[in-house]
Every structure is written in structure tokens, then in C-alpha cells.
Image (cartoon, helix red, strand yellow):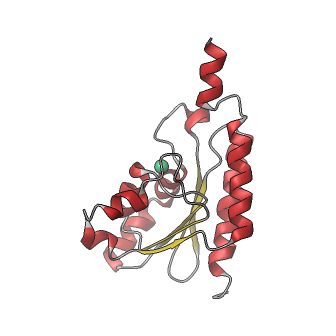
Amino acid sequence: MNVDKDRYFLELAIEEAEAALNEDTYPIGAVIVDDNNNLIAKGRNQVHPHQDATAHAEIDAIRNAGQAILNAKVSRQKFAIYTSLEPCPMCTGGILFANIKKVVWLLNDDLGFGGYRKIKGTNVFDERFNEVELIEEPYADLKNRQMKLMTKWSNNRNNIVNLRSAEK
Ligand SMILES: [Zn+2]
């Protein structure tokens, strides 16, 4: 399990991303795992189905993890989050609040709202960020799968660009 652990959980995250796209929302999925490699929670973007701008995949996974997150804080367990896209500023904050100690994502988000590296780069909350292991884009093939999902999303009727042009 050790060698391919990250890959296994990233595959679960991208399955969630695919489910999100099938629900006509941003193709982003996330899973939370404990330090014994037990799957704690899954999440996916639900912005459009729930009409909630904050319903991001990482926040959804953290909410679904529920009490387990609080228990992990008490017992100092090290949870990891695997997500298909670099977390935005809101989810970066959520990850720090949830005391998650490892973040792995499939695709950097330089064009959209990717925030993790930007906030980390400003040297704020250093003590928090320094406790979190970060792995970016570890698998080219899975990264490519996520890029294809993002391309499909750009053509989706709920994409904001397409919603705007439909207004005209
Ligand atoms: Zn987010």
C-alpha cells in the first residue's frame, strides 16, 4: 500500500471529480485519509447542485469527516487530504483549521483560484504551513485526466463564462 498509497487516494479523488462534472458543477473531488490509510471521508464540488458558492470539494470532505477531524486534533493524528486541484484560498484556510497535515493535489491551479501556494508564499501562518507536507502533481497521467475534466468543464452550461454569454 505504501508505494501507491498516494495514487490510490488520488484516483478516489478524481472519481469524485468526475461525479461532480456529471452533476454539472466544477470537476473537483477530495478525500480525507487517516495516518493508518483508512478512508475517513469523501467530498466533491457541489456549488451548482446546492446553489452554494462555498460548497467546494475540500470543504465538503472536511464537513463529511465530522467528528473524526475533531478527534484527530485531540489525539494528534495526522490526517491527509487528496484533492484533484490545488485548493483555493477558502479551502486552504479550511485545511489549516481542520489540522490536516498532508496535502496532495493532482493539478496546480495557476489560471483559476488556486491559493495554497500563493498564501504559503506570503509567509503568513508559517507555523501552520510548516507542519503540512505538500505534494503537487505527483502523477502525470492523473494530472492529464484532471486537465481533461477542466476542459470539459469549460464547455459546461453552468460554467460562468457560458452563463454570461447565455445572458446576452
Ligand atoms: Zn476551494
The percent coordinates of residue 113 (x first, y second) are: 47, 46
Q: Residue furthest bottom?
A: 2
Based on the displayed image, in which of its 4 quarters is residue 42 positioned?
bottom right
The residue at 67%/75% (across/down) is 7
Based on the displayed image, in which of its 4 quarters is residue 49 positioned?
top right
Count of marks, rendered view: 0
Based on the displayed image, in which of its 4 quarters is residue 43 positioned?
bottom right
The residue at 25%/62% (across/down) is 124
**55 displayed left or right of 23:** left
In the image, is residue 115 above or below residue 80?
above
88 and 35: which is toward the camera: 88
The percent coordinates of residue 127 (x first, y second) are: 25, 73
The percent coordinates of residue 138 (x first, y second) are: 62, 74
In the image, is residue 16 above or below residue 68?
above
Q: Quadrant of the N terminus?
A: bottom right
The residue at 49%/61% (across/down) is 65
